[in-house]
């Protein structure tokens, strides 16, 4: 071994040692741990309650894990729970929600993406005015517009019936709700697409025009293939938003076509019979499952979607 | 001479802002015209107007004798190359080249032969199946040019096509562009803010400022006989040295400095009054050459910038900063005194009022 | 030179039909903006000055009658009071909690993604789900109160859902649980947008992290805070499903909110005039928030 003087060995050398348990770290991670527990607690309570039998719930406390795991509440919630009108459980609401969701997501995204594209690349006199109205519209309480929309849907439906000689209804049908979701999805989605399209290089659009492509040609052949991520973001936003909707479901549909959230509320807050908390929690979890699955799968894209509204246009 | 592109009394305004003002420009068949100016001068706007991407507020545009003022970009017989290349990212090189032809509903075999031809000219045949993201900057630029080439048009429009490339590649592609122009013989209109590109490529340069063409001339004319002070100052690096003074009966006087303008070719005869005299740093003599100069003086050196091939020295003449370009081997340092000389006939005189050449 | 002015392509495209496809494509947007957002809003405001018990009925202009009745009704006053308490607390708590969490997550910690995922997941849930879950947790007989009592504090009382005095705070807990993650994400994004060099500078100058946050970061994040406040405020005024699910407005009418009041007047009591007046009041309260914001945001500079 070579001779090393003592002076060389003392004093700071190399990487500064880090203390994993410094007071700051303990405080930060400690706080975050408590916070995470607070946020996770309700989910935990939902799950354990839904897996217990009613006698156990009446005796035990809500935080204790089930002594005897039972899936009966889930089965009951799905197919037997009563709303006061019928006893089909949540399944009817689930399928209604699916039937509402698919056309609503498709139509709202189609309309908003084309509008966003036109606002960026095909500005016409006053186009910005309409956009400003849309953005302000996002802040108008739904309650202000809800009743006139009822009238519009009813009258339009009747006119269509009259013209076609069929018994077509917009009010109280899934199609009316699709229109409503398209309307109220417009502000945020148009903003989302407008911001995205304006972030694409303008020269691409110019190049395509020199190449002789027109409005739809540029949209489908140039813009769409470059915009898959933003369409996914918009889909996440709309799927969770429409699935979670309660207000429009109550107002614009009738009991047979109530979406899942309305059905859930009617089951849990039904005044008939004995309260079955385990069934209620199973039903609540079932309703929350779709957005939760989407949320956990999509991760950062979901964050991007909700932050999109906050980014200035 | 037939005119390939002709612009008559073109006006363009965005709301209250006039970007182009009553602009007239005629570009000859096969000419390489460069629109040069600093950002915001309206050069790109003018190019977009010619392309049909911006609508003129007033005036007319003719391409090949055809009034195209209201025509769609694709109907104008132009091809365009953009600064950011603007290649369609989801299409292959081949797809990029053929997109315009497909839109024009051209038969398949015709498309194939044109793409093959353009690829050969630009030597991008091995890249045809690749996506733009798999190309280098220079290759992308070539594809962008190819997209204009396949259209088989008379007029090529270039919007700062080399600005996104690094210095070496830019020089290489500049040479290639010049060769391409020589081979194809198309009319080319080229927008840039880079005076080296303008000087090397152009048959004629149009220097623009505030939506107006300041001077439209050959590069050498613009360099040696700038029509106004703005052009004189804009062209050349470092820019021209100016003295503010008075011109009286053939003698320029600025403070203690005074010299006769013998041999100067006047634009306006008999001018007398406040004027600026400008002389380029490379027209200043140093060393032995000073002896032959009409005006000679000793000046203090403030800063030296050795560039290798040249050495630049910032000096002080009669209280104004004065650049001198010397040979690379010049052995000078800040604080030295330098003997310089120049010939006033090589300089330029401008009216201090309207800043036009005297 | 033989350029003729006649020109072969000299068909002046009509302004109206220029880019026809683009114009047709924006019809839905224009209709939604004009008919729904402007038209329906004006319609409701107009009808709030008429006596419309059940439309269609002859409209009779009654001036401010509906508003006078509205403001003399106990239920509406309770709704407004609840909204005010809920709103102020929601703003203060969610911004404070959101900022602290964002600052903690901003400290380059491990498991950042996991923690963010946990804090944000309630935001993905429906208000109905949130409301029902907290209804169960706050259940006076079997919920949190019961657990604490079993642990020995037999006198412990926390039964917001049974106590008209504090029921709105029970809803607030659920609201914060659902919404604060969103505020955190917003503020964290704003924080990440701040120039890294600010942190380097404050380290070089030896300024403690908390001081940097309070005196440098928060002022720099002003636009993000303003945006967050506007978004939270708009959400507060719309709060409806949460109350319906969690308390149905009870006990009695102790947890009523304006949004619920409107829906019930319109579709339950068929007292449309009162419903329109109440919804117009909601619009007014939104405008009180929105107009100063729009003025700050777009007032000074004209951007197109």
Image (cartoon, rainbow, N blue to C red):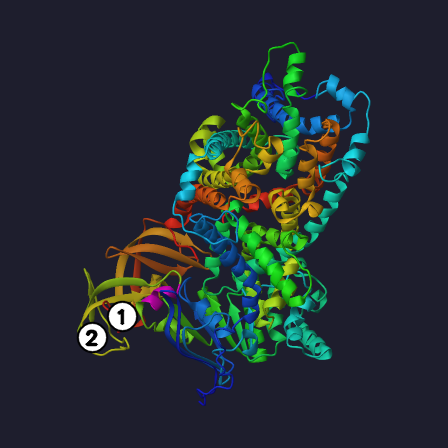
Q: Residue at x 63, y 65 (%)?
A: A162
Q: Which residue is more in the foreground, A45 or C195? A: A45
The answer to whether residue A164 is left or right of residue B245 is right
The disc at residue C198 is none
Q: Give the CA separation, mark 1 to mark 2.
A: 10 Å
In terms of secondary structure, where does tag 2 sit?
Answer: loop
Q: Which residue is mark 1?
A: B349
Q: Measured along the vertical axis of the image, is residue A22 above or below residue B226?
A: above
The reply to whether callout 1 and callout 2 are in contact (CB within 8 Å) is yes
Q: Is residue A112 visible?
A: no
Circle 1 SS class: strand
Where residue B326 appears, as percent x and y from the top left, is 39, 60
Looking at the picture, tell me which residue is in the foreground, C93 or C54: C54
Chain on which label 1 sits: B
Residue B235's spot in the image, x, y percent? 39, 66
Q: Main secondary structure of the magenta part?
A: helix
Outermost residue on the bottom side: it is C2
Q: Is residue C127 left or right of residue B192?
A: right
* Same-subunit check for callouts 1 and 2: yes
Callout 1: 10 Å neighbours few (<14), some, many (20+)?
Answer: many
Say whether residue B102 is visible: yes
Q: Is residue B164 above or below residue A85?
A: below
Give above or below for A16 relative to A140. above
Q: Quadrant of residue C124?
A: top right
Q: Which residue is mark 2?
A: B271
Q: Which residues are magenta?
A: B230-236
Q: Work out whether residue A276 or residue A137 is closer to the camera in this orientation and state it.
A: A276
Quarter of the figure with the N terminus of chain A: top right
Q: Is residue B356 left or right of residue C284?
A: left
Whole-percent x and y of residue B314? 34, 55
């Amino acid at each position: 071994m070579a001779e090393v003087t003592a002076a060389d060995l003392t004093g700071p050398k190399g990487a500064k040692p880090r203390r994993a348990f410094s007071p700051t770290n303990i405080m930060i991670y400690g706080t975050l741990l408590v916070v995470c527990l607070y946020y996770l607690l309700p989910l935990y309570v939902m799950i354990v309650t839904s897996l217990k039998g009613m006698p156990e719930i009446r005796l035990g406390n809500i935080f204790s894990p089930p002594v005897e795991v039972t899936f009966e509440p889930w089965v009951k919630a799905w197919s037997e729970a009563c709303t006061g009108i019928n006893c089909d459980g949540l399944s009817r609401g689930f399928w209604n929600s699916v039937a509402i969701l698919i056309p609503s997501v498709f139509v709202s995204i189609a309309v908003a993406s084309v509008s966003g594209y036109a606002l960026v690349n095909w500005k016409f006199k006053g186009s910005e005015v309409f956009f400003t109205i849309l953005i302000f519209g996002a802040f108008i309480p739904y309650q202000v517009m809800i009743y006139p929309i009822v009238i519009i849907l009813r009258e339009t439906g009747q006119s269509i019936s009259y013209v076609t000689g069929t018994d077509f209804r917009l009010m109280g049908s899934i199609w009316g709700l699709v229109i409503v979701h398209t309307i109220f999805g417009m502000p945020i989605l148009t903003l989302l697409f407008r911001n995205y399209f304006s972030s694409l290089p303008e020269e691409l659009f110019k190049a395509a025009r020199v190449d002789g492509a027109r409005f739809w040609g540029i949209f489908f052949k140039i813009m769409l293939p470059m915009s898959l991520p933003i369409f996914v973001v918009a889909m996440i936003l709309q799927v969770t938003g429409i699935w979670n909707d309660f207000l429009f479901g109550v107002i614009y549909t009738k009991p047979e076509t109530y979406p899942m959230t309305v059905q859930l509320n009617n089951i849990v807050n039904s005044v008939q019979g004995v309260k079955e908390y385990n069934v209620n929690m199973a039903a609540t979890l079932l309703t929350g499952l779709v957005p939760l699955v989407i949320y956990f799968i999509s991760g950062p894209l979901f964050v991007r979607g909700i932050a999109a509204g906050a980014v200035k246009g | 001479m037939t005119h390939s592109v002709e612009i008559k009394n073109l006006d363009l305004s965005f709301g209250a802002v006039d970007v182009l003002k009553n602009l007239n420009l005629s570009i000859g068949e096969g000419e390489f015209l460069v629109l040069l100016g600093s950002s915001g001068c309206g050069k790109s706007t003018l190019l977009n107007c010619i392309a049909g991407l911006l609508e003129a507020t007033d005036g007319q545009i003719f391409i090949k004798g055809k009034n195209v003022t209201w025509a769609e970009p694709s109907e104008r017989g132009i091809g365009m190359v953009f600064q950011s290349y603007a290649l369609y990212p989801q299409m292959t090189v081949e797809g990029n080249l053929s997109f315009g032809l497909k839109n024009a509903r051209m038969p398949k075999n015709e498309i194939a032969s044109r793409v093959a031809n353009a690829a050969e000219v630009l030597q991008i045949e091995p890249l045809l199946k690749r996506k733009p993201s798999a190309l280098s900057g220079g290759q992308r630029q070539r594809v962008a040019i190819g997209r204009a080439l396949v259209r088989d048009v008379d007029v090529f429009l270039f919007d700062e096509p080399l600005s996104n490339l690094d210095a070496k590649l830019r020089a290489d592609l500049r040479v290639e562009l010049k060769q391409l122009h020589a081979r194809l013989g198309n009319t080319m209109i080229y927008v840039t803010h880079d005076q080296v590109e303008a000087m090397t490529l152009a048959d004629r340069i149009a220097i623009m400022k505030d939506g107006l063409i300041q001077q439209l001339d050959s590069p050498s004319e613009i360099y040696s006989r700038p029509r106004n002070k703005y052009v004189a100052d804009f062209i050349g690096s470092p820019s021209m040295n100016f003295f503010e003074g008075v011109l009286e009966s053939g003698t320029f006087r600025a403070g203690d400095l005074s010299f006769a303008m013998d041999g100067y070719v006047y634009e306006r005869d008999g001018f007398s009054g406040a004027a600026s005299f400008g002389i380029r740093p490379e027209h200043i003599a140093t060393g032995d050459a000073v002896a032959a100069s009409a005006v000679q003086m000793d000046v203090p050196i403030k800063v030296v910038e050795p560039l290798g091939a040249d050495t630049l020295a910032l000096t002080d003449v009669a209280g104004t900063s004065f650049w001198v370009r010397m040979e690379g081997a010049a052995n000078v340092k800040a604080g030295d005194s330098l003997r310089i000389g120049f010939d006033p006939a090589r300089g330029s005189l401008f009216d201090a009022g309207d800043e036009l050449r005297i | 030179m033989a350029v003729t002015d006649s020109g072969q392509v000299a068909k002046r495209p009509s302004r109206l039909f220029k880019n026809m496809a683009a114009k047709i494509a924006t019809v839905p947007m224009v209709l939604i903006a004009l008919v729904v957002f402007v038209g329906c809003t004006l319609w409701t405001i107009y009808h709030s000055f008429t006596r419309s018990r059940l439309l269609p009925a002859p409209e009779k202009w009654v001036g401010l009658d509906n508003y006078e009745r509205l403001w003399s009704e106990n239920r509406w006053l309770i709704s407004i009071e609840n909204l005010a308490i809920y709103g102020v607390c929601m703003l203060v708590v969610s911004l404070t909690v959101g900022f602290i969490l964002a600052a903690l997550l901003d400290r380059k910690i491990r498991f950042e993604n996991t923690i963010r995922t946990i804090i944000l997941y309630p935001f993905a849930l429906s208000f109905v789900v949130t409301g029902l879950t907290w209804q169960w947790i706050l259940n006076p007989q079997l919920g949190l109160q019961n657990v604490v009592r079993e642990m020995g504090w037999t006198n412990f009382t926390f039964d917001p859902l049974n106590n008209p005095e504090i029921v709105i705070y029970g809803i607030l807990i659920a609201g914060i649980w659902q919404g604060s993650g969103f505020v955190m994400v917003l503020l964290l994004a704003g924080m990440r947008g701040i120039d890294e060099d600010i942190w380097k500078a404050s380290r070089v100058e030896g300024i403690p992290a908390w001081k940097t946050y309070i005196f440098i970061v928060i002022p720099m994040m002003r636009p993000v805070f303003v945006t967050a406040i506007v978004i939270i405020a708009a959400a507060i005024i719309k709060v409806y499903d949460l109350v319906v699910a969690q308390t149905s407005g009870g006990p009695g009418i102790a947890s009523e909110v304006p949004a619920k009041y409107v829906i019930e007047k319109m579709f339950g009591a068929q007292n449309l005039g009162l419903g329109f007046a109440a919804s117009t009041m909601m619009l007014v309260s939104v405008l009180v928030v929105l107009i100063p914001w729009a003025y700050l945001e777009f007032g000074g500079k004209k951007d197109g």
